[in-house]
Amino acid sequence: TTTPDGARAAAVDPALRTRPERTAFAETSRYDDVTAFLRALEARAGGRVHVTTMGRTTEGREIPVVLASRPLVTTPEAA
């Protein structure tokens, strides 16, 4: 597989490819794409990624927050 600039793309779990990557950058990610990507990332990150929310949009959708660290830190107190 090659990227739009002709570089060779590394083999990546299909669940970790964004909509733009899957469509040769012809499409933009939608909210559901982003949340699915974040869930897949969290599931495959071996305890280094935690996805939570920081509120809701005016449309009622959750605003995701990604915490990534080694070891995983999920609270200010733990940091």
Image (tube, grey):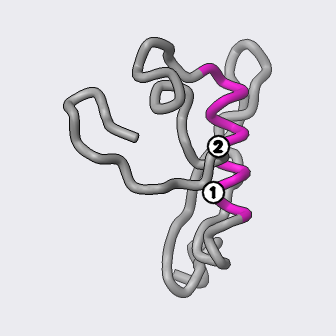
Which image quadrant for residue 45? bottom right
Which image quadrant for residue 63? top right
Q: How many marks?
A: 2
Which image quadrant for residue 61? top right
Label 2 element class: helix
Label 1 element class: helix
Q: Position of residue 6 (x, y in %)?
A: 22, 34
In the depicted structure, whether residue 35 falls above or below residue 58: below
| Label 2 crowd bin: few (<14), some (14–19), many (20+), radius 10 Å | some
The residue located at (56%, 23%) in the rendering is 29
Q: Is residue 50 left or right of residue 25?
A: right
The residue located at (68%, 22%) in the rendering is 57
Question: What type is the residue that disc 2 sits on?
Answer: Phe
| Label 1 crowd bin: few (<14), some (14–19), many (20+), radius 10 Å | some
Residue 36 falls within the magenta-colored stretch: yes
Q: Position of residue 67 (x, y in %)?
A: 56, 62
Q: Residue furthest right?
A: 60
Q: Which residues are magenta?
A: 30-43
In the depicted structure, whether residue 54 falls above or below residue 22: below
Look at the numbered discs 2 and 1 and tell me whether their residues touch, using CB distance below 8 Å.
Answer: yes
Question: Which residue is more in the foreground, 19 or 55?
Answer: 19
Q: Indicate which disc residue 37 carries.
A: 2
Between the residue at mark 2 and the residue at mark 1, the CA separation in whole angstroms equals: 6 Å
Q: Indicate which disc residue 41 carries.
A: 1
> How would you classify the magenta stretch by its main secondary structure?
helix
Q: Is residue 49 left or right of residue 8?
A: right
Residue 35 falls within the magenta-colored stretch: yes
Question: Which residue is more in the foreground, 51 or 25?
Answer: 25
